[in-house]
Amino acid sequence: MSPSIITTGKSDEVFVSSSPIPSKNSAPARTYTLQEIASHNTADDLWIVYDKQVLDVTKWLSHHPGGEQTLLRFGGMDATDELRAFHDNWVLEKKLPHFVVGEVRDDENVSELVRDFRELGEHFEKMGYYRVSPWYYVWKVATVFCIFAMVLLLVFVTQSTVARMAAAILLGIFWQQFAFVGHDCGHMSARTHARDSINVPYLGALVTFFNGISVAWWKATHNVHHAVPNSVDCDPDIAHLPVFALHEHMFSSLFNKYHKRVMEFDWLARNVFVPYQHLWYYPIMAVARFNLYLQSVLFLLSRNDGHSGRTMLDSVAFLGFFTWLVALVSYIPGWEERIVFFFLSHAVAGLLNVQITLSHFSRPIFDCNKDEYARYGGDFYSRNVISSLDVACPAYLDWFHGGLQFQTLHHCYPRIGRQHLRKTEPLIVSLCNKHSLPYTAKSFIDCNIEVYETLKNTATNAKKWSPLIYESMCAQG
C-alpha cells in the first residue's frame, strides 16, 4: 500500500540561523584523511569526527552516558549531526576539545539538505524550544500520580470487583503516561534551562521504580535506535526474531551488531511466528511488557554497557517496583481476581508497545551491508525522516500519544520539549517538502492498518521462503 504524504502550510514562521556552530580551539598540528580515520573503528581504538575535528573517544567509551554502542556505531565516521542532536552546544564547546587529536584533511562536503536541517536546529535553540516551562511538567507529573492515587484508592478502599478492574485499567494507563515522562527526561527534553543539573541515575531509578522497566537498559538501546533507526543489523528496536520480521532481509539470519549475535530465522520463526505475525501482533503487544521485564533483567545482570554504578541503583529500583506491585496485587481477594487484575493492567499498558512500533515498523528498512556509502540509510536527517511515521491527531489527544505522534520531529531533534512539538511540526514538514523527503502522517487507525499490512506482506513472503532460496542467492552473489 502506498503511503499518503501529508503537507501543510499551517505556519508562516520563518527561521534564520543566528546561533554559531560550536567554535573550535586552535587548529591541532596533525591532520588525517577520512580514509585514515575510518580504520579507527574498534572499542580499543575509536575515533569519530565532529565539525572537522578528529576525536579519540577510546578511553571515554565505557563512561559515555549514552552507552558504548552509540559511539561504536560511528567509529571512524563523521558523527557531527548525531552529536549535535543529542548534546547541548555548551557540552560540545566545553567537553569535546579534551578528545581532539587532529583535524580532517579532506574538504567538507555538506549538502544543502543537511545545512537547512542544521539551521532549523539552531532556530529551535534560539527560540528556546529545547527548554520547557517548569509548570508544564509539574502538571504532567501531578496528573500521572493522581492516576496512581486512584489505583490505590480503588484497590485498598473499595470492595467492588468492578472497581478493582477499573483500577487495573488505570494502572496500565499510569504506566503508559509515566513512561512518556521518563522518555522526555531520558532525552533531556524536560529541562527548564539548557544547563539544568539533572542527576540522571537517580531520576532514572525513580522512573524504574514506578514503571518497572530498567531506564539503564532503555538508554542503552534507545540511543542506538535514534542514531541508526531501521538499520537492519544495528537497530535493536526492529530486531525481534523469532517473533517478528519486518523485511525479507531478516530471513537470512543476519548478525546483529547491537546484540552481538546472529538473529536466527529458525524453525520457530519460519513455522510458528513470522508466517502469521500479523495475527500475532496485537496479542503479543498485550504481553510485550513481560519481555521488557526480561530484557531489563538480562541487561542488569550483564556487563551493562559499562555503567555499573547506574545499573546498581537501577537494580534496586527494579526490585522495588516488583515489591510494591506484589503488595498491591496481594491485597486483592482471591487468586482469580488477582490474575485478571495483573494481566489486564499489563494488557492496557501494551498500548504503549503499539504506539512505539507504529512509528517505525512499516517504514523502509536500511540494509547497510549492500551500500556502505549510504551509512545507515544516508545522512542523519534523511534516515530519520524516511524511517519515521507520524500520527495525525487533534490536539486534545496529545496526552494519549505522549509526543510520540510527532515521531519525525522528535527523531531529528530529540531534545525539543514536548510542549513545543505541535507548533514546530509545520517547520519540519516544510523542510521535508523542500527537499522531497517523504514526510508521512496518518491517523492512528490508518497507522495500525499500515503496520498490519506490512507484517502481513512479510508473512506471505515468509511462507514462500526456504533455505534453498537463500543459498541460491548467496551462490549467485
Image: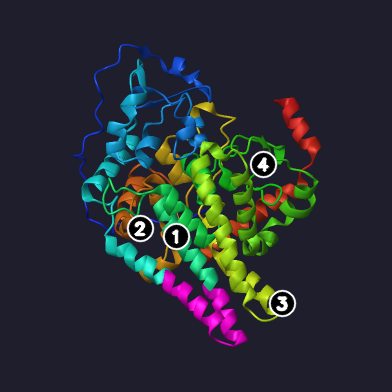
Please name the residue that numbered disc 4 is placed on.
250
Seen from the viewer's position, the closer of residues 259 and 273 is 259
- Whichever of callouts 1 and 4 sits on the residue coming sooner in the sequence is 1
Picture quarter with the N terminus: bottom right
x then y, percent, for residue 453: 62, 57
* Residue 216 screen position, x and y as percent: 51, 47
Q: Are marks 2 and 1 in contact (CB under 8 Å)?
A: yes
How far apart marks 2 and 4 lie (CA) works out to 34 Å
Distance, label 3 to label 2, CA atoms, is 41 Å
**Residue designated by label 3:** 335
Classify mark 3: helix, strand or loop.
helix
Mark 3 and mark 1 lie on one chain; the one further toward the N terminus is: 1
Residue highlighted by disc 2: 418
Looking at the picture, how far across and down is residue 437, in whole percent? 41, 44
Left or right: 86 in relation to 329: left
The foreground one among 17 and 103 is 103
Q: Which of the 4 image quarters holds residue 95?
A: top left
Q: Residue at x 64, y 71 (%)?
A: 342
SS assignment at label 2: helix
Residue under numbered circle 1 = 180
| First-in-chain label (2 vs 4) | 4
Q: Indicate whether residue 166 is drawn in magenta.
A: yes
Provide the residue span drawn in magenta. Answer: 145-170
Rate crowding at label 3 as few (under 14), some (14 to 19) or many (20 or more) other CA atoms within 10 Å: few
- The answer to whether marks 3 and 1 mark residues whose Cβ atoms lie closer than 8 Å is no
Q: Amino acid at mark 2?
A: Arg
Q: Nearer the viewer, residue 274 or 207?
A: 207
**For discs 2 and 1, the disc positioned in front in the rendered view:** 1
Residue 222 relative to residue 18: left or right: right
